[in-house]
Every structure is written in structure tokens, then in C-alpha cells.
Amino acid sequence: MKGKEWLDLALLLVFSVARAASQCVSPSPLGLQLMVEYARWRSLDQLVIFDNLIPKKCQRLYARSLMSCCSEKGMKISIHTTLDEHLTDILPQVFLIRRHRVGTVIFTDGLNLTSPDNILLLASQKQLFNYYISWLIVATKRNDAIIDTLLRVLNIGIDSDLIVATSPLSTSQALNVTNQYLNRTCTGLQRYAKDYRAPKMRRTKNRENSTYNLDYVVQENKTVSFYLCHVYKIRNSENSSLVIDPLGSWNPGTYTLRLPVSVELRNNFHGFPLLVGILNSSSEVQPDNIDEEEMDDILPLLDIMAFVVSGINASIELVPHDKLGTVVNKAWSHLLGDVVSGVVDIGLGNINVNDERQRGMSFTHPIIQSMRNIYFHPPESGSMRDIFLQPFNNRLLGCVAVTCILMVLAMTAINYAGKLALSNETETHTGLGEAGLWCIGIMCMQGSPWSPRSPSGKIALLSCLIFALVIYNAYAGFITSILSVQAVGIKSLADLLFNNYKLGYSGNDDEYIRNANDSNLRELYIKAFNGREAGVDTTSGLQKAAKGGYGFFVSARLARRALRTTLLHNRCSLKELVIPQTFTVVALPMAHTCPYKKIITHSIMRISEVGVLSRISERMLPRMPQCEAPTTFHSARLADVYSAFVILVTGVITALALGIFERVWSQRKSVREKLTRAIHVHRREGHGHSHGQANDAVSTSRKKVKEDYLEDSENVLSQELGRRVFTSNAAVGSPRIGLQGTSAGGDFSIAGRLRSRGIFPTPGILGSSDFSGLKLSSPRRRSNVALSPVDDQVSGSNENPEPIIPFHV
């Protein structure tokens, strides 16, 4: 059966209502059999029986038989009385079983329809006729007119699950049918049927112009125990909207029935209206009565409702409201108040779903996702971002470094083994330094001058080259991907707060941001309030943000709409910072007891499946304006590779420092002597500066020493040159020799002195080897003069060059 598709466990409440008269009216065996088979058909596993039989006055003769029969079918039952004075208070709690649907059966035999305490009127007052409770009314009289006389005026909605079973049989015919199937029913009901005596019922007079229950069905030309009809109303308050849907006939053990139409599929309202409470509008919805911004909010919602009512053959009746409403002392006001109380069927507006509203009302399928974002002008991308090592995480970088060290050690070991094997004849000595340079060259894809002769060395070199190839290509791919996107420094609200942006927020979001629990949003609120940027107009706030240094917190719906209309020229200068903690959905509110919840939600889901809802939602929440994206990769900037320059500068400075250290270390003796001599000279000069006359004496003494050196050198050179033979056969192209002296008093030249004394009759023709290794001794001062040949250092004309012989005193 299809009844197995229902929930596993359901509750069946059986109200056996009898007339409180001198006789006790018990339910007929045929009605009890219908109840048991109906419970199995609707997959109800638990029965709760309510009757008005007082134990002291009337015995529940059917109770034991019914309990034994239900236990055989796997159902559980319990019995309560409807005469409890607290029934009105406890009735809603009786049906409140959250995991299961509830079933109810009422026998109309002896039911006083005019009594204000009858169970049907109580259920109508408590709004218990809904899809959660499955009702079955059993009428055993063929002239029963409960549908037309009572159900038409009750508070029954389109979502109700109310079945009326009416028997066309007389009392004698019912007893004959009972006897025919008696051997096919359970043992308990067999005993009850044998002892059952039909009560004598007083005929009731129906109202004028009333319609019998059987008039709503097509009677078959055969014996039928009960005809079943599904009864509901399109509008609870409209008695003329009553709908009777025949379901078929039932006989004990055999029936031809179909399940009631599902609530979601009751899509024919026969033109009856839906009461729609609309926010910030008028009943005529004319553009002259509302501004353009409000019209942009209303029209997409009206389009959604137009699709909904066209699918259910209904009409729209708008009820205008000025305010959305809030809850005060658990009571909602304005539009939401009318929704909760049922004055309107559904509310229309950009209403966000939150926990407080969900506790007081229900919502349809979400229409759009609402969000509040921050709009700002991105800072200039001059900040430093290092992409040199960005493709590597710490773990990969460590693995590469360890691999390089192992490569260096392997190269060194292979070279050392090759050197030992070749007896130091063909293999040069290499150490860790050379191996490190080779490894760096391989990792940088520059090759390597290392050419090992052993197979182990060749395998090691090949492995290093393949490893470097894989790492280099991965590195290059990551660098390319990094340059293909724009660098964004601000990715969250925390980054925006850290960059010291001036912040403001829209006046429409004042209540939201004041009640926000997020710490960053609270800081934004405080910063905007202290900077007097609270409650800024949407257009003004976005214009401030476009100038830079300003972040504006506003609803995405309002901001995107403004960027597409009034601020079209600023659409590319602003960036949208999404705030995930502000995400919510916009849906249409309805009361918890609204009979149209399932129907409207199912209609919205249907238009969502065909793509209509997405197009309408885009009008409510347009996309962020897209600017033309660049077609080329972003060029690498100096800021992107600054670490490479840092490495280069560090290497150059380190090389210079090591070079200076090596030079100083190799010349450490001469440097030490010069430093010592400089210190002694400084000390002597220090004593000389203390006395001005002493300085003059020292200067005169130095001049005299210089003259003595010159005179002694002239005499010695004259004697030596006199003994040398100068011939005119000397080579013309030989280097010329000059005399240049150096003493503690300074540099001086004696070439002119010798020429004036006739020592050089023919200048410029002396051989360089004539004076090589010549040492002159001064008789006055104990010092030597050394002569050495030099090339011609005289520039200018070739005529009469001045020979200079350098020597040191």
C-alpha cells in the first residue's frame, strides 16, 4: 500500500462521542472495523481513544475487544474521556507529538452539534484542522448532513486532512454486512459484534436547504459500507470556498480508495485571493506614490507573487503597511504583527530571516542571500610583497636545502675517492667550496663544470640535474601564477582596521551594527561613531570611499544598485570586501498556522527550478559591476623581487669584506711596520707642535740634510761616471736613464746638477745596464743611494728629453 510512505509512527485519537442520555450509545462493529483498517491504510501505529462514557453510568464494552484487536495488528491504544473539565486546556498538548502525525476519529452517533463543548468546535477554536492532524468523521446515518451544517462554518483550511465517511446502509443492512464478514475479522471484534445491540436512535430533522453527505459522492450500484470524502476550504473565513473531493468506497476487507491530494498539490484556489501585506507601498502600487528606490524593491517581489498566484489559480489582495514591525513583550507590531495574527497570509518585503523572527513566524523558501559589505578604494600596490620565496612553504624549502647539502657532500666524497684512485696525477684537488658552487649552478639551471669520470659521479650528477629541473619548473609555474593575479593587501575587515582606514556605515544598517556580536563589527561601529560617520547616506558614503582612505559599511543590495546607476563612473575604483558574518537570507514571512505555507513554498521552489527566481533575484541583488579585466600578466615589480636584491647586496658586501680581510692578512707585517712608524712620527710631530721655534729648527735641519745628500750624491756620481766609458755606439732605441732621489726630506732631482757640471755631455744615450745595482755611499751621512734602470717617463716632445735616474736615499 502507499500508506507505508507515511511516517513510521502516527497517533490516532478516537473520539467516540455519545449522547449523554438515559442510554449509552456505543460505536457499531462496522465503524470499529473501519477505524482499524483506516489506521492501517494511513500507517498509524498508535491509537488514543477519547469518549464521553462515564464508567459509573456506562460501561466501555468495546474497549477490551478493540484493545485485543489492535494488539494483533501491532497497534497500541489508550482510552480517555471527553468529559474532562480541563479538556479545553489540554487538547493542544494531546496532539503535540513532534515526531509523528496525529490521527483522530469521531463517531457522529449521538453527537450534539449545537453544544458549544463538542469536540469539533473546540478543535476549530484551537486551529487544529491542519495537515499535522489527520481527522476521520464516521457518520452511520444515510441522511447525515454534517458537511453542510457544521464543517462549512468551521475554521478549516486548505491544508487540512479531514475525511468524512458516510454509510448508505440502514441499521438492519449494517448488521447483515457485519455478520457476513464476522469470520474474517479479529477475535475481539467478533465477540463484540455478537453481543452488540443497535440502539434506537431518534430521527433528527435537518436544516432547510441543507445537503446530505451522500449528495457529494457518486453512489455505486452495489452494496457499499462507507463512502469517503476529503473536505477542506480554500479560505478559512470563506464558507463558499468549501471543497469536497470524493475518495472512493470501503467495504470490510476490500476498498477502492485513493489517498487525499497532498497539501503541496492543492493548486487550484478557484480565483480566491491571497492577502499580501506589503511594506512601504500602496494598494494600487503606482509609481507616483512611492520613490524609485522603493519601487525597485517592490516590483521584483510582486513579480514573484504574480508567478505564485498564476500557478495556483488565485488572485492578490494587497494590504499596505508603513513599517516592518518589531517584537515588544512577545507581541509583534505592524506588518509582522499582522502576519503572526493571520490578518494577512504573507508579508512582502526585503525581510531578513533571523532567530528571533523564526521563533514567531515561518518563512518561505529563500529568495536571495542578503549581505552587508564594506566598499573601499584599494591602496596603491606599492607595498612590499616578496614573491622570490613565496612558492615555497617552510617544509618544501627545508627539503630543498637538505637535498642541496647532500648533493655537496656526495660531490666532495666522489672527488676525494677519485683522487685516491688516480694517485693524485690526473685529478685536481677540490673541496667543499667547489662542490657548493657546482651545486648552486645546478639548482639555478646554469649547468656545472664538474665532469666526473666514475659511474657513481655520473649518476649523482644526472640525479642532481633531474631534481633541479623538476624544482625549477615548479618554481617557474608558481611565479607565473602569482603574477597572473593582482596583489591585494586587504582581504578582511581586520586588515581594513589595521590599515587605519576611516570608516562609516549606512543609516539603514544602524540597528544591525549596533546589535552585532562580532568584535570587528563592534570596533567598526565605535570607530565610525567617534569619527562622526554614522548613518551616512548610501551615495555619499560610496563617493567618499571612491576618493580613497575610507571604508563604507552598507547593504550589498543598495551599494550595487547605486554603482550601476548614479555612481556608474566610480564602479571600477571601488572594491567590495565581503563580510561573511553578515550573511543571511531574504524570505517571505507567514504565520505558523498559515494554511498556505506548503503551497507557497512549493510554488517558489518550482519557479526556482525553471530559472525564473534567479532572474528576479538578480534584479533585487544585482551583481557587482565588473570592469574590463587585463588581458596580460602583471609585470614583476621591484617590490616583488626585493629579496633577490637583498641577497645580491649582501653577497657583494660580504665579498668586499672578505677581500679586505685577505689583503690585510697577507700584508700584516708591512702594515704593522707602517702603523708603528706612523705612531712614532705622530709622537715626534706632537712634541714639535708644542713649540713653534722648534718646528722652524726642524725645518731648517731637514733642508740642510737635503743639501748634504745632494752634494754627496753629486760627488760620488761624478767620480763613478768618470771611470765609466761612454761610447756613441749605444743603441738609439735603448731606454734613457735619469737620476731621481728620494730622502726623508722629500723628492729631488740631480739630473740638472750633473748636466751643469759636464757629466752628461750627450743626454739620453746612457745604457740601462750601466747603472744597474749601483749603490752610492754618502760620506757625511751613513746612508746608501741605490740606482736602478727605468723606462723613459718623460712625456711630450722627443727633443732634448731630460734623463732621470731614480734612486732611493
Image (spheres, helix red, strand yellow):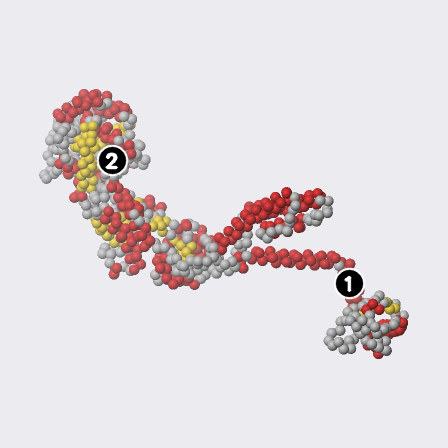
Identity of the residue drawn at 76% across and 77% down: 799
Circle 1 packing at 10 Å, graded few (<14), some (14-19), many (20+), is few
Say if residue 745 shows up in the picture.
no
Give the answer, above or below, for where 18 lies relative to 388.
above
Give the answer, above or below, for where 60 lies relative to 443.
above
The N terminus is located in which quarter? top left
Residue under pointer 1 = 674
**Disc 2 on helix, strand or loop?**
strand
The answer to which quarter of the image holds residue 217 is top left
Amino acid at dot 2: Ser
Identity of the residue drawn at 67% across and 59% down: 656
Residues at discs 1 and 2 in contact (Cβ within 8 Å): no
Nearer to me, 650 or 189: 650
Give the answer, above or below, for where 579 lies relative to 696.
above
Name the side, left or right, on which 667 lies relative to 653: right
Amino acid at dot 1: Lys
| Residue 404 point in image, percent of width and height | 61, 47
| Residue 805 point in image, percent of width and height | 81, 71
Name the side, left or right, on which 788 lies relative to 529: right
Give the answer, above or below, for where 520 lies relative to 568.
above
Name the side, left or right, on which 256 lies relative to 359: left
The answer to which quarter of the image holds residue 727 is bottom right
| Residue 565 point in image, percent of width and height | 34, 61
Nearer to me, 162 or 21: 162
What distance separates the C-alpha of mark 1 from that of mark 2? Answer: 116 Å
Mark 1 or mark 2: which comes first in sequence? 2
**Residue 134 bears which disc, if any?**
2
